[in-house]
Amino acid sequence: MSTAIGAAPRTAPVTLDLVIPFFNEEEVLATLLTRLRSAFSAERLRAQGVSAVRYLLIDDGSSDGSAAVLAAAIQDGLPATLVRFSRNFGHQNAVSAGLALSKADVVAIIDADLQDPPELVLDMVALWRDGYDVVYARRRRRAGSLLKRVGYALFYRLIALLADVRIPLDSGDFSLLDRRVVRAMGALPETLRFPRILRAWVGFRQTGIDYDRPERGQGTAKYTFIKLYRLATDGVTSASVRPLQLAQVFSVTYLAVIVVLGALVLAFPRWPELGVPPWALACYLLILSGNFVQVFCMYILGAYVGRTYLETKGRPPYVIMEVVEPLATGGERAR
């Protein structure tokens, strides 16, 4: 791929942070650590001019032994910081915490379940060196049930259709961000954060890299259909106010249709012969169709009102209970 238009290639050594949110992933952590050590070996880092790598491991309130496994790995020399939430605050908040705590020149976001292959991150660094500020991973194909594949495909296309900015299709949180992009996202004031939407909103030079998303190798998926529904609702309300505008258009269209139908009903000459007063039929049509429109509009309005209510509370999106860091002389430090 060619260098980004108007950007000079970046040749200086850089530091890299990997934001890795997780929730009850004890079963997959051994494999994850092995893959990380292989993907970010000294030889591979030198080849891309990465002077140092750090893993920001964000524990979203796990109740299994995940934190203990990672704390032991840090004690054994893993270049990582383990951040533990006081409870489960959600994947998007875990990603936001990792971005807020990152300090490196470039920051990558991957999932702990290895459906985001860590080996792809250094390929993203290569595109960043070509002048791109955001490199997002675009799913060419994804494993999993047909229902989930269809659901995700519809979700991304709905977001792209409704959003006020261009949202790349089939691209989740898996991405690489330049430091100034992370800084711009962090400066945005909202509490309820949807990083992949904010990433698109701040702009800068963006490009995608295609990959095939594999099936989860170990453990169980943490996104239930209820959580996916909430994610979709948060994504749509975060991306745009077009659903509210759609409700307005729908209401006006409904009024026009009812006026036309009412005129046709009142003009039909045979209603008296059938024993049905025209005004009664017109009222029935008005009430029946009006209920549907009201429910539809209230559903859309409720999503925005609920989000506004949570924003006005001003509560932090997460609470950090503990931070485990490596000591300069080895071992670990908790605070």
Image (cartoon, rainbow, N blue to C red):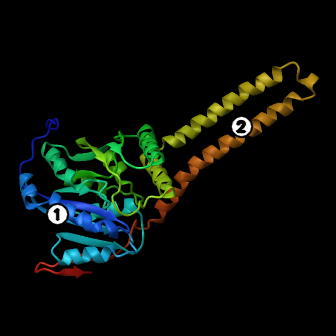
* Residue neighbourhood size for the residue with mark 1, other residues' Cα within 10 Å, grouped as few (<14), some (14–19), many (≥20): few
Instruction: Answer with the quarter of the image where residue 331 lies.
Output: bottom left
Residue extending furthest toward the front:
217
Q: Which residue corresponds to the image point at 32% horizontal and 50% vertical from the top-left? A: 214
Three-letter code for the amino acid on which mark 1 is drawn: Arg
For the C terminus, give its image quadrant. bottom left
Q: Which residue corresponds to the image point at 20% horizontal and 75% vertical from the top-left? A: 74
Residue 37, numbered label: 1
Seen in the picture, residue 314 relative to 320 is either above or below; the reply is above
Question: Mark 1: which secondary structure?
Answer: helix
Q: Which residue corresponds to the image point at 30% horizontal and 45% vertical from the top-left? A: 212
Instruction: Answer with the quarter of the image where residue 31 lies.
Output: bottom left
Q: Nearer the viewer, residue 192 or 18?
A: 18
For the question of whether residue 44 can be seen, the reply is yes
Residue picked out by circle 2 = 289
The x, y position of residue 330, in whole percent, is 13, 80
The answer to whether the residues at label 2 and label 1 have Cβ atoms under 8 Å apart is: no
Question: Mark 2: which secondary structure?
Answer: helix
Q: Which comes sooner in the sequence, label 2 or label 1?
A: 1
Q: Nearer the viewer, residue 213 or 131?
A: 213
Front disc: 2 or 1:
1
